[in-house]
Image (cartoon, coloured by chain):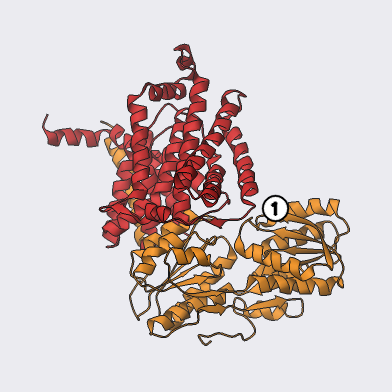
């Protein structure tokens, strides 16, 4: 009995903390102004790529005066968490959904109730399986994303140019089964086929420390390689570090894909030979613009390609200056 | 004793707060969210919340069986996608849901059996044995799937997620049924008592003639089978099989059990607590999503709630 106040204090602390978090962190205004109310769901916020997509969506929302809510799962492969977010948001008053799936199917089932309400859904960045979408009766209004196959081909072309059309190369892959990575790899292989020899393909889960370890080992087995193609910048930066550690900087060219800030800086300093920059920020902007247009009763294209640009030491400075926006003009169906 | 004074006495007893930390936490959190957002207390939201919690709930039950013996199953992070891949491959080749469900459960149990044998017969620590299997099964899932995720398309699976009997959705009915069965096993069967004894006092249990090795193998076997069930739910919910490791599910399943008041040292099963624990974690996720709480604060808030509940459960009798 003596402990009563004690236990109540614990209880009070718990309740107070929860209330404090819940209320203090609510956004200042969730006012339902304008006709569109946009929900964007991405994979996670640990990856700078998805953070850039979020920032683009939020900034465009402010520009157009449209409320935008962005949510995400807890990791790059957290399909269950992402689905929980979608199911929850399906019960709120959003007029439009922009969704980045984790794989070709994971968001289809939780989106069925959204689609049944007639709410437009825009598939962002990673394409959904067309057959599964059709048999689920899901209505996808538009796809906005960059062509990962084209990014892989651009990387392949530049690798051929840097190596003079011959030599041994290594490919670093991300999470096995991740669709964007598969498209990047396949296009790279196709472009260099018959000219460059791929001596090893290694999986490094899109992670920098893993790529560093893997490439250090590869350099011992294949000291004669002259190029590394990495399916994302994080692994590319790890590979570049391993090469620098081995004292071979400049002798082995590294080309990666994504265009995150650190990679742009590494290209400028010469540590990384090139990155094929995709613009998730522009994807986020276009997603909100598309929702805005739909709310105004306009029709939007079924497929919108977001920009891609090869960044080398020549244009890295410009790319850094205008980051996260593209430094060049591109075909934007929604206007600038 | 008058009911009112009975209640006051209960509320004054710190043991009551400790024993029911997760349930009390769940009620408090639900009340707070109901006040803060009108959407929270709608049936549509509650029903989607339960659907979202179902996979975690089944995984937490799997974890519960193992944790009662003082063990821990880290391998579920990859035996879940492994069973999901087996389910998908079986269904895509034979187009039979019952066969695919059996294949998923058997493939989950196979992992459990290996875990149990390594731990009980080779005397390897649970943490290390299942950590090893986490890697092994991740690799196997990637090998059999060719590293690819693939669509598993079936009206049955879609109906499992979206269909309902009246207002009750099938999806969480499966999870609640499993929780109910687990409760019966621990409360009314000799097997449940033996498992509890194995975790409570290993030597005493052995002296009483309980084969503790057998109990430890059996809990991993049951846990593995439940992971198979969770895999079926996951394929239904995500429309496909994906071999990627599910580390977030692994950690939240352990957190649910601990939140529920079960000791990581074994000997204590709290099915209601574990169910409440899983619901608390899902409710926080759903509530913060509804309130549009900045994503940077969400994991922090969840972490604080887990610690707060653990502190509260220190008052356990």
Residue B302 appears anywhere in the view: yes
Q: Residue furthest left?
A: B2
Q: Residue at x 73, y 68 (%)?
A: A188
State the image quarter where residue A109 is shown: bottom left
Q: Residue at x 48, y 57 (%)?
A: B153
| Mark 1: few/some/many CA within 10 Å (<14, 14-19, 20+) | some
Quadrant of the frame with the C terminus of chain B = top left
State the image quarter where residue A62 is shown: bottom left
**Does residue A330 sit above or below B74 in this rendering?**
below
Residue A17 appears anywhere in the view: no
Q: How many circles with numbers are drawn on the protein? A: 1
Q: Is residue A248 left or right of residue B47?
A: right
**Does residue B29 sit above or below B70 in this rendering?**
below
User: What hue represents chain B?
Assistant: red
Q: Which chain is orange?
A: A
Q: Is residue B92 left or right of residue A35?
A: right
Q: Residue at x 58, y 78 (%)?
A: A306
Quadrant of the frame with the N terminus of chain B = top left
**Residue nearest the observer in this picture, A252 or B300:** A252
User: For mark 1, what is the residue?
Assistant: A210
**Residue nearest the observer in this picture, A254 or A313:** A254
**Residue nearest the observer in this picture, B197 or A322:** B197
Q: Is label 1 in a helix, a strand or a loop?
A: helix
**Does residue B64 sit above or below B157 in this rendering?**
above
State the image quarter where residue A264 is shown: bottom right
**Does residue A117 sit above or below B63 in this rendering?**
below
Residue B29, image x and y in percent?
A: 32, 51
Chain bearing tag 1 is: A
Residue A118, image x and y in percent?
A: 36, 72
Residue A181, image x and y in percent?
A: 65, 63
């Amino acid at each position: 009995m003596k402990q009563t106040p004690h236990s109540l204090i614990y209880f009070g602390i718990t309740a107070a903390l929860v209330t404090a978090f819940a209320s203090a962190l609510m956004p200042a205004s969730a006012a339902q102004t304008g006709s569109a109310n946009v929900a964007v769901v991405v994979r996670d916020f640990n990856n700078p790529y998805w953070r850039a997509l979020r920032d683009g969506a939020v900034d465009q929302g402010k520009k157009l005066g449209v409320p935008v809510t962005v949510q995400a799962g807890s990791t790059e492969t957290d399909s269950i968490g992402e689905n929980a977010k979608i199911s929850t948001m399906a019960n709120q008053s959003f007029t439009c959904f922009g969704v980045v799936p984790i794989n070709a199917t994971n968001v289809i089932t939780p989106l069925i109730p959204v689609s049944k309400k007639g709410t437009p859904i825009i598939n962002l960045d990673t394409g959904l399986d067309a057959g599964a979408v059709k048999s689920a009766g899901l209505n996808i209004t538009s796809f906005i994303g960059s062509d990962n196959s084209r990014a892989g081909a651009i990387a392949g072309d530049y690798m051929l140019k840097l190596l003079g059309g011959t030599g041994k190369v290594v490919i670093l892959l991300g999470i096995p089964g991740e669709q964007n990575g598969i498209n990047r790899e396949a296009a790279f292989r196709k472009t260099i086929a018959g000219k460059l020899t791929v001596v090893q393909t290694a999986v490094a889960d899109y992670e920098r420390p893993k790529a560093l370890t893997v490439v250090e080992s590869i350099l011992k087995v294949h000291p004669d390689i002259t190029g590394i193609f990495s399916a994302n910048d994080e692994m590319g930066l790890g590979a570049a570090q391993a090469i620098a550690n081995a004292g071979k900087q400049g002798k082995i060219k590294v080309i990666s894909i994504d265009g995150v800030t650190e990679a742009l800086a590494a290209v400028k300093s010469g540590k990384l030979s090139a990155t094929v920059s995709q613009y998730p920020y522009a994807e986020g902007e276009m997603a909100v613009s598309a929702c805005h247009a739909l709310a105004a009763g306009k029709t939007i294209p079924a497929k919108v390609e977001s920009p891609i640009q090869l960044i080398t030491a020549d244009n890295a400075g410009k790319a850094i200056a205008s980051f996260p926006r593209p430094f060049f003009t591109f075909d934007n169906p929604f206007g600038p | 004793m008058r009911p009112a004074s009975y209640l006051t006495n209960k509320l004054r007893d710190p043991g009551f707060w400790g024993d029911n930390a997760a349930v009390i936490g769940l009620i408090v959190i639900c009340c707070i969210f109901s006040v803060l957002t009108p959407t929270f207390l709608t049936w549509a939201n509650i029903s989607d919340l339960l659907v979202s919690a179902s996979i975690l709930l089944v995984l937490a039950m799997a974890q519960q069986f193992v944790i009662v013996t003082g063990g821990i199953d880290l391998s579920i992070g990859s035996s879940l996608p492994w069973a999901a891949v087996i389910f998908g491959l079986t269904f895509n080749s034979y187009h039979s849901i019952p066969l695919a469900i059996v294949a998923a459960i058997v493939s989950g149990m196979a992992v459990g059996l290996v875990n149990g044998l390594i731990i009980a017969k080779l005397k390897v620590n649970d943490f290390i044995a299942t950590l090893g299997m986490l890697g092994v099964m991740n690799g196997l899932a990637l090998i059999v799937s060719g590293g690819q995720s693939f669509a598993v398309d079936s009206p049955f699976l879609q109906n499992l997620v979206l269909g309902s009997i009246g207002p009750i959705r099938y999806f969480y009915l499966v999870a609640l049924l499993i929780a109910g069965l687990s409760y019966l096993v621990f409360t009314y069967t000799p097997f449940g008592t033996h498992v509890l004894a194995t975790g409570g006092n290993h030597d005493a249990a052995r002296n009483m003639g309980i084969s503790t090795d057998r109990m430890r193998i059996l809990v991993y076997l049951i846990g593995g089978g439940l992971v198979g069930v969770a895999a079926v739910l996951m394929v239904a919910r995500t429309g496909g099989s994906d071999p990627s490791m599910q580390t977030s599910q692994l950690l939240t399943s352990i957190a649910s059990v601990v939140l529920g008041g079960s000791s990581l040292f074994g000997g204590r099963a709290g099915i209601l607590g574990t169910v409440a624990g899983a619901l608390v974690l899902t409710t926080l996720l759903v509530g913060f999503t509804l309130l549009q709480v900045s994503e940077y604060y969400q994991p922090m808030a969840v972490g604080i709630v887990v610690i707060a509940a653990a502190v509260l459960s220190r008052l356990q009798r």
